[in-house]
Every structure is written in C-alpha cells, then in structure tokens.
Image (cartoon, helix red, strand yellow):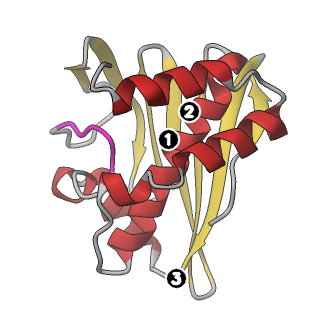
Amino acid sequence: MTDATLETIDGRPALRFERTLPHPVERVWRAVSVPAELERWMPATVGWTPAKGETFESYGATLEVTEAAAPHRLAWTYAGQPHGFELTAQEGGCRLVFTHVLDDRASSAQTATGWHAYLSRLDRHLSGGYLSEEEAHQGWAETHERYAERFGVDPAPGRRFAESLRAGRP
C-alpha cells in the first residue's frame, strides 16, 4: 500500500493517495460510486446517483457532488473540504488518485491514517474479499505516527482522537 503525500491545492493542505490497481477502470468506478459497493469499504455512504449538483446531509455536514464524469472522475465537497477520485485506465488495470483537501494541516496525519485504512478496505473489496473496519485500523497508531513525522505535525491530537474512539467517545 502506497502512503499519502501532503501537497498544496489552492493554498490549502491536501492529501493525495495514488494506487495502481489490477482491475479495469469500469470496475473501480463502480466500487467508488455505487452505494452498495461503497458500504463495503467507505467510512460513510450516501444514496447518490452520483450526479453533479446532488446534495446530502451526513453527520451534520453537507455533501455536494461537484463532478461526476463516469468512469474517470468523481468529486465532492464535504463540510467544505473537496474530495475526489481520478481513475485512468492503464496497462493491466487502473491508476486511482484520491485527493482530500483539508482545512488545517494539523489534522493531516489523523486524516491520512483514516483514508489509508479505508483504501486498504477498497483494495480488499476489489479483490473479492472483505476487510472489516476493525482489521483495517489495527495498525492505526503506527501509521499515524509515521504520517505525523513525515508531515511534520504534532501527533497528540490524533492520539487523543484514537483514544476517545477506544473509550467509546467520539
């Protein structure tokens, strides 16, 4: 699994994950756009089409689809943070690029760690298997520390967040 990079998009910190997947672009498109497939790996799913301009309320924030160009580009904003999948067919499969533009660099390690776990679930789903959230998050602490060091951010907020989840407090 390839780690995230921290970049800048429009003056804001952005996580970028890039994967080469041994599946056709159309198969990967279904996995990132069809609600029944999303629920197998994504942290929260919506009943979208998806179509540009669709909006949903989820966990107290608005999600708006900003681009839906099957089977190559799917983008949305959630709570004002842009997210997107870019899929490109290539020899033997598909190149997936996922970006998440953040409001604050301080949350980059924690957010990268979460997406790292969910993209590992996507990998397993595409291969015909299933990886539970619990299994996907088993290495959370080590992955988080690695991202915090690489991105040069304080790991304490992510550690507190993980501890609150373990204690059953959001």
Q: Which residue is mark 3?
A: 22
Question: Is 128 covered by the magenta stretch?
Answer: no
Q: From the top left corner, tell me how far across and down residue 64 is, in percent.
A: 34, 23
Q: From the top left corner, tell me how far across and down residue 8 is, in percent.
A: 78, 27
Name the one closer to the observer, 10 or 70.
10
Taking the image as shown, residue 78 lies to the left or right of residue 8, namely left
SS at mark 2?
A: helix
Numbered badge on residue 156: none
**Real-space CA distance between mark 1 and mark 2, rounded to the nearest whole angstrom:** 5 Å
Instruction: Please name the residue shown 25% across and 19% down the image.
Output: 59
Magenta: main secondary structure equals loop
* Residues at discs 3 and 2 in contact (Cβ within 8 Å): no
Question: Is 45 covered by the magenta stretch?
Answer: yes
Q: Which residue is mark 2?
A: 111
Please report the bounds of the magenta region as a residue range: 42-46
SS at mark 3?
A: loop
> In the rendered image, which quarter contains the N terminus?
bottom right
Name the one closer to the observer, 84 or 147.
147
* Residue count near mark 2 (Cα–Cα under 10 Å), binned few <14, some 14–19, many ≥20: some
* Residues at discs 1 and 2 in contact (Cβ within 8 Å): yes
Q: Which residue is mark 1?
A: 114
**Real-space CA distance between mark 3 and mark 2, rounded to the nearest whole angstrom:** 26 Å
Q: Relative to 149, does residue 155 appear above or below in the rendering? A: above
Give, as a three-letter code, the residue at label 1. Gly
SS at mark 1?
A: helix
Give, as a three-letter code, the residue at label 3. Pro
The part of the image, by quadrant, that contains residue 100 is top right
